Image (cartoon, helix red, strand yellow):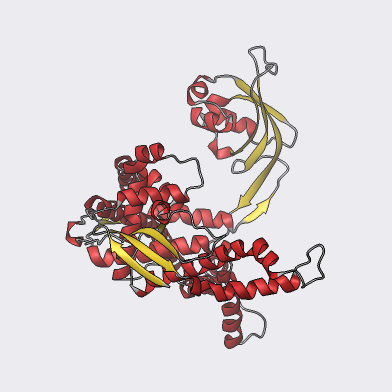
Amino acid sequence: MNVTRENLSDLELCIKVEVAAADYAENVTKQLKRYRQQATVPGFRKGMAPMGMIERMYKPTLVAEEVNNILSQNLYKYIDDEKLDIIGSPLANEEKTGTPDFSHPADYVFYFDAALMPKVEIDWSKIDTKLLQIKVPAKEIDSQIEDIRKRYGKFETPEAVGENDHVYGKAVELGKDGKVKEGGVSVFLSFEVQEVKDEDIKQSIIGKKNDEKVVFNAFKAFGSAFIEKNFRMEAAAAKKFKSDIEFSVSGCSRITPHEVDEELFAQVFPNEEIKDEAKFRKAVQKEIEKANDEQCRILFVNQVRRQLLDEFNAEMPEKFLKRWILSRDNKDLTAEKLDAEWDEKYLPALKWEILDGALNKIKSIEPTHNDVVDYVKDILKRNDRGEADETAEAKEERIEKAAQSIASDRNNVSQIVDRLYADKTFELFKAQVKPEVEKVTGKEFGERVKEDNEKNSKKDKTEEAQQAHEL
């Protein structure tokens, strides 16, 4: 067994693997003897067939299997031993290797093409982006508290519709004659009474009971946006829809908001000692800020990523990479299609994978199993109220066991891994860029996101390719 390489360029190389007959002969002989002992061949007792016959039947296949095993093991051992930071995986050079004849065992020589990972130098001084922070106005806290009060409020199904109820039922379009229009709109509607814009129509709905009907103009009641969404119409058709509808009440629901008291505080924040409304408002504000910060972090990471891609100037072994993608793609990808989509779809994704490797050398951003376990434990602890007569040690042991079980199921943790990867990437970017913090309103933040998306319309293509062609 001998493995050597020839450097074809700064990034591309050819690895030569020599497999001598002595490397595989002993194992092949052992397997042939085992086959002979187990083989049932017509005309011979079990285990008594001539070895020559067994060799003709099985030896080529066994030689091929053994040679391929030795080849694979030693190829990757060589790559590890030589610390070759390769991109993708080695590709068999069939032209140089030829077609091995396993029917006539001999010494074999195999050739593989490979490419090294381009060296990336990141100049963080060229990355210029701010970390936004969204201000939380008092009215947003008020709105969130109202939502919380409803969420923890008393749910009822009254006999008659009230002014603050949610009502649902069937709506059918009426013709100019006031009768059900043949081929007209017929949909199930669900809406808040307070959504009704016209006061007279609103009053006509209030007080109605199950199976009672009310006729009103849908456009006056809701406007075109509601009609477009709930009547499943195109925007232009919704704006022209001026027909009356007959609405048959199927039922309604009512939520009486919870009082702002200590019982509500304990339900919403079970692990915090909140005794008054001021502290409750502070806790609600902190939750809003936490959600806002997550959105700001996502925007910051995306902007830094794109700037890193823009500044990427390392040499790429494109010829090899195109061969590698075509060799592993299970879809109907042709060389012509790959060339057409290379600059906008595949190349940015490959560049990011290379950048990702460079970033991991600065500080690991790939989540570990322990990272996932710790994340799950934190969630479990925040939502766990303990068991009767359970000691602190027993609780810790129970949560640890549950977290290990959840983290071991790959179907459970894919989203957690993505979240942790995003968090680690943000922390790395923040430490390297040291961004200026800019406070903005929620509206201003939305405008920044819209502007960012418009500037970077290629993002979806890049991420799609990244998922399909991870190195």
Residue for point 31% across, 49% down: 318
Nearer to us in this view, 183 or 206: 183
Question: Taking 348 as reference, is 436 left or right?
Answer: left
- Quarter of the image containing the C terminus? bottom left
Question: Taking 433 as reference, is 367 left or right?
Answer: right
Give the image quarter of residue 395: bottom right
User: Residue lying farthest left?
Assistant: 125
Residue for point 55% across, 57% down: 149
Q: How many marks?
A: 0
Question: Taking 218 as reference, is 77 left or right?
Answer: left
Question: Taking 1 as reference, is 354 left or right?
Answer: left
User: Residue lying farthest top?
Assistant: 177
Q: Height in image: 470 above or below 462?
A: below
Q: Position of residue 361 (x, y in %)?
A: 30, 69
Residue for point 46% across, 70% down: 20
Residue for point 78% across, 66% down: 40
Q: Position of residue 39 (x, y in %)?
A: 75, 68
Q: Position of residue 8 (x, y in %)?
A: 27, 58
- Quarter of the image containing the N terminus? bottom left
Give the image quarter of residue 172: top right
Nearer to us in this view, 272 or 10: 10
Nearer to us in this view, 444 or 394: 394
Task: Look at the image and tell me whether residue 9 can be seen.
Answer: yes
Nearer to us in this view, 195 or 15: 15
Give the image quarter of residue 15: bottom left
Q: Height in image: 355 above or below 209?
A: below
Task: Look at the image and tell me whether residue 373 can be seen.
Answer: no
Q: Height in image: 82 above or below 258?
A: below
Q: Where is residue 294 in the image (x, y as percent from the top left)?
A: 39, 59
